Image (cartoon, rainbow, N blue to C red):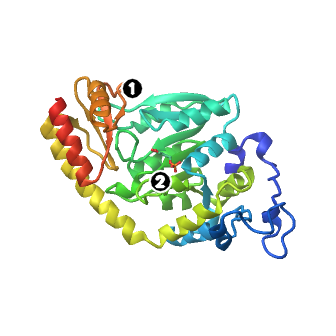
Amino acid sequence: MIIQLIRSNLRNFQAYSSARSLYNKGMLLDANENSFGSVIKSADDLSLNRYPDPYSLDLRKALAKFLRMSEKNIFVGNGSDEAIDLLIRLFVEPDEEIVVIEPTYGMYKVAAELAGVAVRTCTVDENFQTDIAALLSNVTAKTKIIFCCSPNNPTGVLMKLQDIERLCKNFSGVVVVDEAYIEFASKPSAVRKVLNLPNLVVLRTFSKAWGLAGIRVGYAVAQPEIIEYLNRIKPPYNLNRLSGKLAIEALAKYPKMMEFRGAILEERKKLVKDLSAVGFKVFPSEANFLLVSYPQASKVAQVLAEKYGIIIRDFGTKPKLKDCVRISVGTPKQNKLLIQALKKII
Ligand SMILES: Cc1ncc(COP(=O)(O)O)c(C=O)c1O
């Protein structure tokens, strides 16, 4: 039972009883809002003088329709970063640990350290693949969460659905699969696997393919028990009215997102060719970025930034990533400028 995995002091945790969770219509004189309106005229149409729905039901219903699941399977947060933080705080006791598969997205470790829990690392092989048997053998009685990132940032490697399933079935803790870049992948999401795997949590976001990093909306998909606990421990009004509204609007623009996806994948293909022609080793990517290596790549990144104002991300100090940099796929014009600059530098 998943409840057994929840931190013992949180099993009977009483959520903060926010005003808008008790009442959201009527003559609202209960939350010390400004009943006259907002100082910004246009904000009045959106009732921005009022706190948002604490449980973002409209957005969760829209997401449920989009995923063909129930809103009870969906937690929405202030970016998926908020879900990462809350998952660690919900499940991992101070003397327990999480496992991360290096190199990967840095926030799992940061959130764990902030929560005062240990981080055990397991490293990918030479092809950036995760050996599931080795990962499972690395797990201890203290391991509460395994974080997997698929496609992985910064390697661009996608995990097989069978591997995720195997991990969930052979690990007694929680498996979090972060699918921030899944829209760019060639294989389907693991999201519907949560229906049969009670210890699986899938994270998704509006920050990448949907082009909405600025509104900070991410979501976790899991069985209702986990979602219910995340909702209990989250800050009362974690998602603001503007972001919730824009995320709902975004879902209605699915074809536009797919258009972006198509254009980005097309550019990714071109960029692979062009970077290889310049002399970079380009690793296969299932995301909207490319991990590439070149002798003294960090120096190249530095000159790109200082001389050309083109910013890429240096990963040279991370495990297995000597001389590696990560380049986000840009527009055709940006990619052309990048390649021109690289030709001059190299
Ligand atoms: C793998 C991964 N997960 C999560 C995030 C953060 O997503 P959000 O903007 O939804 O907090 C990022 C951002 O770069 C990421 O690379």
- Return the x and y of residue 7 as percentages of the image width and height: 73, 41
Q: Is label 2's Cβ within 8 Å of ligand 1?
A: yes
Q: Is residue 78 left or right of residue 165?
A: right
Give the mark, 2 or 1, whose residue is nearer the N terminus.
Answer: 2
Q: Outermost residue, bottom direction?
A: 26
- Return the x and y of residue 276 as percentages of the image width and height: 16, 39
Q: Which mark is residue 319?
A: 1
Q: Quadrant of residue 47?
A: bottom right
Residue 289 position (above or below residue 32):
above
Q: Is residue 228 left or right of residue 329?
A: right
Q: What amino acid is found at the position of numbered circle 1 in the picture?
A: Pro
Label tally: 2
Q: Nearer the viewer, residue 62 or 102?
A: 62
In what quadrant of the picture does the C terminus appear? top left
- Label 1 secondary element: loop
Q: Residue at x 16, y 44 (%)?
A: 274
Q: Mark 1: give few (<14), some (14-19) or many (20+) Cα within 10 Å.
A: few
Q: Residue at x 53, y 64 (%)?
A: 247
Q: Residue at x 60, y 42 (%)?
A: 173
Q: Outermost residue, left direction?
A: 277
Any part of residue 330 in sight: yes
Q: What amino acid is found at the position of numbered circle 2 in the picture?
A: Ser
- Label 2 secondary element: loop
Q: Residue at x 27, y 60 (%)?
A: 263
Q: Which mark is residue 207?
A: 2
Q: Mark 2: give few (<14), some (14-19) or many (20+) Cα within 10 Å.
A: some
Any part of residue 196 in sight: no
Q: Is residue 39 left or right of residue 184?
A: right
- Return the x and y of residue 183 as percentages of the image width and height: 39, 58
Q: Of discs 2 and 1, which sits in the foreground? A: 2
The residues tagged by marks 2 and 1 sit, at their Cα atoms, a distance apart of: 26 Å
Q: Nearer the viewer, residue 336 or 136?
A: 336
